[in-house]
């Protein structure tokens, strides 16, 4: 089955700097790669997703890049703010949408230092 | 539009008991997935329901079961509870569970086994 590795497990950056979280996946059939943000006491919140026919996607301060050849995708957050502090999860699935089930990375605890 | 609603938010049980968790998806969403989140194993896919039928199942023992009703609400049942079943159980919904449809999570039910 699919295996998703996520690094780093903890990332501390100064407010205003950029943060990058990286994931690799094992199943070349995977085509859908969402990123979730989870705050304490809350469920994961979808922040951005990308499909295999797209190499990069941006939404304001957040961007995701995908390299299908290397089976690697990354989350980039620019101009970080205190409210960006949370745990971030990457995930992969073949079709997306739920029918296949998402395989998640172990998460990255992002800490924004004031 | 109301989000995914899970009840109860917290539950305490003892070993050997059984438990039923409830999930109401976003209005109009017909696919409901369940995930288990623990510090050690992270987020793991349990199963997915669409139109009252289980379409996919993760690698969990038969003690974990679920069902979906005609109004798309779903319940998850765990029988003969073990200490290792202590976890946050998350429900996610999407419109049909197919491609191009992101999954949205509820805030979960925190289950503690004594």
Image (cartoon, coloured by chain):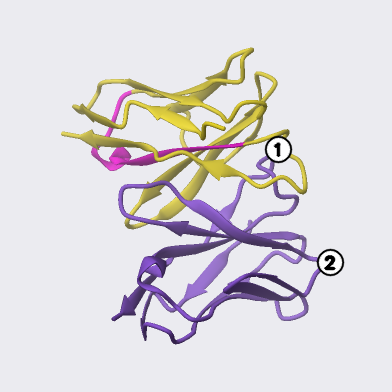
Chain colours: A purple, B yellow
Residue A98's x, y, as percent? 65, 42
Q: Is residue A52 visible?
A: yes
Q: CA distance from mark 2 to mark 1?
A: 19 Å
Residue A67: say if magenta: no
Q: Residue A13 location in percent, x, y?
A: 37, 84
- Residue situated in front as seen by the camera: A9 or B1: B1
Q: Which mark is residue A53?
A: 2
Where are the magenta residues, as a range?
A: B80-93
The quadrant in which residue B13 appears is top left
Where residue B31 sits in the image (x, y, percent)?
65, 31
Q: Chain of mark 2?
A: A
Which label sits on residue B60? none
Q: Residue at x 56, y 43 (%)?
A: B104
Q: Residue at x 46, y 51 (%)?
A: A44
Q: In the image shown, does A52 or B104 lie closer to the viewer?
A: B104
Q: Nearer the viewer, residue A75 or B3?
A: B3
Residue at 51% across, 23% down: B66
Residue bearing mark 1 = B97
């Amino acid at each position: 089955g699919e295996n998703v590795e996520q690094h780093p497990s903890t990332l501390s950056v100064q407010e205003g700097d950029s943060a990058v979280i990286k994931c690799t996946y094992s199943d070349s059939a995977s085509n859908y790669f969402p990123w979730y943000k989870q705050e304490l006491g809350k469920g994961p919140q979808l922040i951005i997703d990308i499909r295999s026919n797209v190499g990069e996607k941006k939404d304001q301060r957040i961007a995701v890049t995908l390299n299908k050849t290397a089976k690697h995708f990354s989350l980039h957050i620019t101009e970080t703010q205190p409210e960006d502090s949370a745990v971030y999860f990457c995930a992969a699935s073949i079709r997306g949408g739920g029918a296949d089930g998402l395989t998640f990375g172990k998460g990255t605890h992002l800490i924004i230092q004031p | 539009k109301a989000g995914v609603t899970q009840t109860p938010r917290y539950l305490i049980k003892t070993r050997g008991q059984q438990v039923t968790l409830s999930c109401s998806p976003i209005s109009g969403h017909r696919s409901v997935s369940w995930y288990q989140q623990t510090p050690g194993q992270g987020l793991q896919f349990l199963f997915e329901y669409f139109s009252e039928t289980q379409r996919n199942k993760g690698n969990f023992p038969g003690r974990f079961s679920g069902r979906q009703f005609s109004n798309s609400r779903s319940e998850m049942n765990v029988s003969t509870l073990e200490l290792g079943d202590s976890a946050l159980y998350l429900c996610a919904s999407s419109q049909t569970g197919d491609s191009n449809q992101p999954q949205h999570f509820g805030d979960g039910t925190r289950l503690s086994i004594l």
